[in-house]
Image (cartoon, helix red, strand yellow):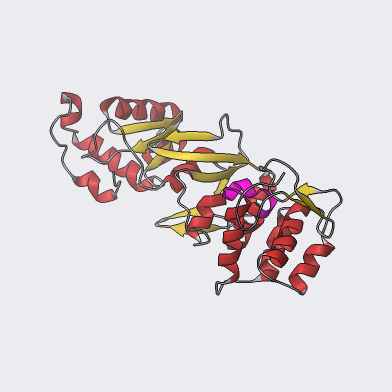
Amino acid sequence: MNVTNSNYDMPWMGGMTKEAAGPNRDVKERLRRLAKGSQGHLVTTRRAAEILGLEPRAAHLALGRLLKAGWLERVKRGLFLILPLEADRKGAAIEDPWILARELFKPCYIGGWSAAEHWGLTEQIFRETFVVTSAYVRSSTQSHLGAAFHLVRARSPRVASVSTLWRGQERIAVSDRERTLADALAIPAWVGGVHHLIDMLRSYRSSPEWQPSRLLARVGEVSSGAAFRRLGYLAEAVLGERGALVEACLARRTTGNVRLEPGAKGKGKLSTRWRLWINVDLLQGGSLS
């Protein structure tokens, strides 16, 4: 279902209840105002009160009447999707899940495999939108309005440091190329594991956007010594890098040994240079005991 402003000027189609079949002029005007003032056709009770010039209690009641009549779809308590006039009252879906994620899980940013897809770092297709949030979430996987989300939590400063970009007419926080890689170097599962991370590093290294100094800065932002060790090791073993990038990673090693792939069984062979257990076959993709 495509939700566009022009749809609010269209008449209702057949198959509706008597209440929904013919909105009066006041209801149509109210819907137009809500749609115009919404964010991605999503509106909160507080925002609706501002748009309509109502007290919060009156706005709550007004939204309740529109919901009952089939003009809105409830996403969660206090958040609604404004439906176009020709929409089916059942099974409403949203056009852009990134906008829905922003409203559902803020403060948050789009990261992990979703950001990697956006920047062309991977050709893998993931069904779930990857969201990093500092808000409390009950479940790491959620579905709303036909969109599936994979959620991870991070500290507020880490979330707040991500900049926004334009997504149509909306601004969405999305990790840039280097921050996406830095997050994955700290937690490879955010992009589906270390083998996907390797493909992403190769793609980034061969692109015109390759900026090792910027990548190092982003890895520093995530405050993970393990990320520097993974970057240094993979830069040598996979990218064939020498010199400044590798030396910078060596200088930032932390104590203790960590697994190259935290999600794989076994430790494999220890790289004393990088203090990494090389527990996956970089060429074949299997884990090492």
Quadrant into which the N terminus falls = top left
At x 78%, y 51%, the residue is 269
At x 53%, y 61%, the residue is 121
Q: Is residue 272 above or below residue 70?
A: below
Residue closer to the observer: 179 or 42? 179
Q: Residue 2, position in %: x, y?
A: 29, 47
Q: Residue 100, position in %: x, y?
A: 44, 42
Q: Residue 170, position in %: x, y?
A: 44, 54
At x 28%, y 30%, the residue is 90
**Highlighted range, magenta:** 185-193
At x 43%, y 45%, the residue is 97
Magenta stretch contains residue 188: yes
User: Left or right: 154 with respect to 118?
Assistant: right
The residue at the far left in this view is 14
User: Left or right: 152 with respect to 128?
Assistant: right
Magenta stretch contains residue 16: no
Quadrant of res 15:
top left
Residue closer to the observer: 219 or 249? 249
Q: Is residue 14 above or below residue 259?
A: above
Q: Is residue 283 above or below residue 12?
A: below
Q: Is residue 234 above or below residue 265?
A: below
User: Left or right: 66 with respect to 269?
Assistant: left
